[in-house]
Image: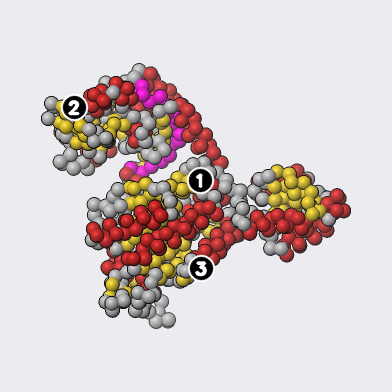
Amino acid sequence: MVVIELPDGSKLEFQGPTTVKEIAGKIAKSLEKNAVGAVFNGELIDVHTPITESGRIRIITPKDPESLEILRHSAAHLLAKAVKKLYGNNEVKLGIGPATQEGFYYDFDLPVSISEEDLPKIEAEMEKIVKAKEPFRREVISREKARELFKNDPYKLELLESIPEEEEVSIYWLGEDFFDLCKGPHVEHAGQIKAFKLLSVAGAYWRGDSRNKMLQRIYGTAFWKKKELEEFLHRLEEAKKRDHRVLGKQLDLFGIYEEAGPGLVFWHPNGAIIRQEIEQWVEEEHRKRGYQRIYTPHIMKADLWKRSGHYNFYRENMFFVPVVEHDEEERLGNDEVPLTCSEIEKAHWYAVKPMNCPGHILIYKSQVRSYRDLPIRFFEFGTVYRYEKSGSLHGLLRVRGFTQDDGHIFCRPDQLKEEIQGVMDYIMDLLSTFKLDYVINVGTRPEKFIGTEEAWEHATNALIEALKERGFEYNIVEGDGAFYGPKIDIAVLDAIGRKWDGPTIQVDFNLPERFDLTYVDRDGQKKRPVMVHRAIMGSIERFIGLLIEHYAGLFPTWLAPVQAVIIPVSDKYLDYADEVYAKLKEAGIRVKLDDESAKVGYKIRKAETQKIPYMLIVGEREKENQTVSVRSKREGDLGEMELQQFLDKILTEIKEKA
């Protein structure tokens, strides 16, 4: 007998194997009609997958977020079938085609190169399959049969060999003439995929490895309703306008130069101003909150990273440097290499730091700590370097060198909740200052963890109680903690509702053990402190990338590289424009005088393109009245103002970070 437990605790009994469809029908006919899958014993399955054992079930309908994964995975198969029909069933080799957070993609080895101009043709072929309502059907097959079916498709054969022996092998049919190696789940038939759009074409190495062949990847998205698709496409267009890489070039904020290396950011003067303003605010906030500023080296011995555990878990993402001790007169290497093989064999290995924690720990360990000294809060703008594959690099958002507002708190267990609340208060001030919304997630103990269950429970409760007492809404994400401790992750929402990685708070039981961190308690015994990793902004590069897109390049006045531009209507009024410029400069305003011999309309358009918050137009009337005509990028034409009136307005705006 198969016993199925529903979310409300009630149970249904079946004499033999059953399906989601049958279970839904027992509950309500409307649910049977709307069901697209289910979560059974934690696994996502489709409506016709045989259920042969008892367990808990939650039926999925288009209203549930998991339903999009089923729909989009099905759309990827729909795309693959259409491409095979258009470009040759035997000629097209299939890679992988997963659902993603915002859509789906499929990787193809094609006999021809395709571009975005080909997408409408592929969409038209997909529409034919949708209109025919071709069914999806799962079939479990032997490995021998799978090898026979995919004997001409090397990518599928490779995937087949990676399936563990104890797992069953399944394919999914779409209609009677297309099948794909797939675990599922899928919708019942192609007719359910009513709202889809192919978005772009890109190159992608097979399995993300640059040593493998470059395949052609087609990206798309799918929704249950046309309206949802239209809203998504609108957001996509808006996102293109806000692309920080385009705006970064337009506003001359930063550059990444191939001569220096991929993923390494150069801040131009305009971008440096934004970064400096943010860093000054962050530093002042840390000072007010009892943090001590420290500095740690950029490279440290590889042995230190072995002790911390980073070497074993993270070395593929680290940069290593061999250091050979030598006399000043001794010349190392040769014209071809900086060090010869024999010199490298004698070298001491150092690593460019990928994280700042070991440096903070060494400072903590530099003296005996008393329970009265705790909490100790260290902070630095620590620049770290991590090797990211070149294909994953993306403007400021994914780089190889970045700076963190990295902080570590060393405290007693009884201080943990209060320290978490202090960090949360700081995070809320940051998000409020930059006008950002957020979602809070708490990650709990994963299957593999270090530390005792008792310590995990204490730390997790401290995180949750800290949030509850401050009245925060949050989501529990079971098993999402790091192996070394529970965490709070805050996803930041930008102006068009996209989620970005944001602040994080992580409790760590690992490093205090590895480095034998202690404090002397009031009973004279040595105790282990709790260590808290916290980043308020995280990567400054990524945070500024987020801000560029959030503000669409129009920064609040306190951050704007140029806060006001003076535009004389003709060269006759340059003397008065110089006077205005001098007074604004003296007041601390970042001001620019546009003295180019050009028409006023052109100068205004240029200032708007540069997204300067204020334009001050000066001509005969303004010179006579000792005023300026103010044009705000946000508020439009503000009319004529006395200069002091404008200064009061802009200085208040800057002070209040409005």
What residue sits right under mark 1 in the picture?
A: 494
Quadrant of res 602: top right
Between 464 and 516, the one lying in front of the other is 464
Chain part drawn in magenta: 189-206
Image quarter in which the N terminus is found: top left
The prevailing secondary structure element of the residues shown in magenta is: strand
Circle nearer the N terminus (1, 2): 2
Callout 3–callout 1 Cβ contact below 8 Å: no
Q: Is residue 331 above or below residue 66?
A: below
Q: Residues within 10 Å of mark 1 (few under 14, many from 20)?
A: some
Between 450 and 465, the one lying in front of the other is 465
Measured in 3D between alpha carbons, the distance from the residue under mark 1 to the one under mark 2, in whole angstroms, is 45 Å
How is the rendered protein coloured? secondary structure
Query: Label 3's element?
Result: helix
Task: Examine the structure image and report whether residue 190 is included in the region drawn in magenta.
Answer: yes
Looking at the picture, how far across and down is residue 624, in whole percent?
87, 53
Q: Residues within 10 Å of mark 2 (few under 14, many from 20)?
A: some
The residue at 20%/32% (across/down) is 11
Circle nearer the N terminus (3, 1): 3
Q: Is residue 164 above or below residue 416?
A: above
What residue sits right under mark 2 in the picture?
A: 18
Circle nearer the N terminus (3, 2): 2
Task: Examine the structure image and report whether residue 611 is included in the region drawn in magenta.
Answer: no
Using residue 374 as the reference point, say whether residue 614 is left or right of it: right
Between 58 and 267, the one lying in front of the other is 58
Looking at the picture, how far across and down is residue 166, in whole percent?
15, 41
Residue 245 is at least partly visible in this image: no
The disc at residue 287 is: 3
Query: Label 2's element?
Result: loop
- Between disc 3 and disc 1, the foreground one is 3
| Amino acid type, callout 1 | Asp
